[in-house]
Image (cartoon, grey):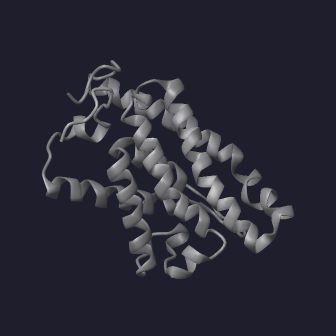
Amino acid sequence: MDRSTDLRLPLVDVAWPGRSLRRNAIIVVTGSLLVALSAQIEIPLQPVPITGQTFGVLLVGALLGSGRGGLSMLMYLSLGAMGLPMFAGGSSGVARLIGPTGGYLVGFVAAAYVVGWLAERGWDRRIGTTALAMLLGTLVIYVPGVAWLSVFVGWAEVLGVGVKPFILGDLLKVGLAALVLPWGWIVLGSDNPSDGTVE
């Protein structure tokens, strides 16, 4: 398939080259499981707990790229809806998708796609652009999350319960990702933005 020459391979394709369907399936499943593991890092708050989920989502998007990142999050939501303990605190079920935190969960798909799309354009290779990509991804999670949460708590309360408690943690996650991803490229010897270009 012909792709524009301004597109670059995501980190996973440089670390593990190949194009087989089996390999891509393993990558997508692994991404969903990584987010499930990160969801178990939880500080219980009501109605929205603080978890490591968003860090996992943004990292998976950057590592896998837009298509596989988005698919990985769709798998994550599907497995959780079917009853596997994928969500925060080992929870599961369709009720989580339609409950107060459902908007954030749905936002994971779009956020992974957006961050992956930016990574395919080299944004994950420098600290500054990585941080900006992660901030944009975080905003993509917040938009449907806050909008849906407002149905349960009202617009007057939504910022206090759905945004403010998470700002510091999300900034720390952005900073960590901004250090981890460019370092990954350096370790692979592909820190130059022109490396990995798809011809």
**Residue 56 appearing in the image:** no
Q: Residue at x 69, y 62 (%)?
A: 147
Vertically, is 148 above or below 26? below
The answer to which image quadrant residue 153 occupies is: bottom right
Instruction: Judge left or right: residue 42 versus residue 38.
Output: right
Residue 133: image location, x then y, percent? 52, 36
Residue 151: image location, x then y, percent? 74, 72
Vertically, is 161 above or below 57? below
Instruction: Judge left or right: residue 196 versus residue 76.
Output: left
Instruction: Judge left or right: residue 165 versus residue 126.
Output: right
The answer to which image quadrant residue 45 occupies is: bottom right
Vertically, is 73 above or below 193? below
The answer to which image quadrant residue 4 occupies is: top left
Q: Residue at x 50, y 50 (%)?
A: 111
Q: Residue at x 63, y 76 (%)?
A: 99
Residue 154: image location, x then y, percent? 81, 69
Q: Residue at x 70, y 67 (%)?
A: 149
Numbered-mark total: 0
Vertically, is 157 above or below 24? below
**Residue 26 appearing in the image:** yes
Residue 67: image location, x then y, percent? 34, 50
Which residue is more in the foreground, 20 or 2?
2
Quarter in which the N terminus is drawn: top left
Quarter in which the C terminus is drawn: top left
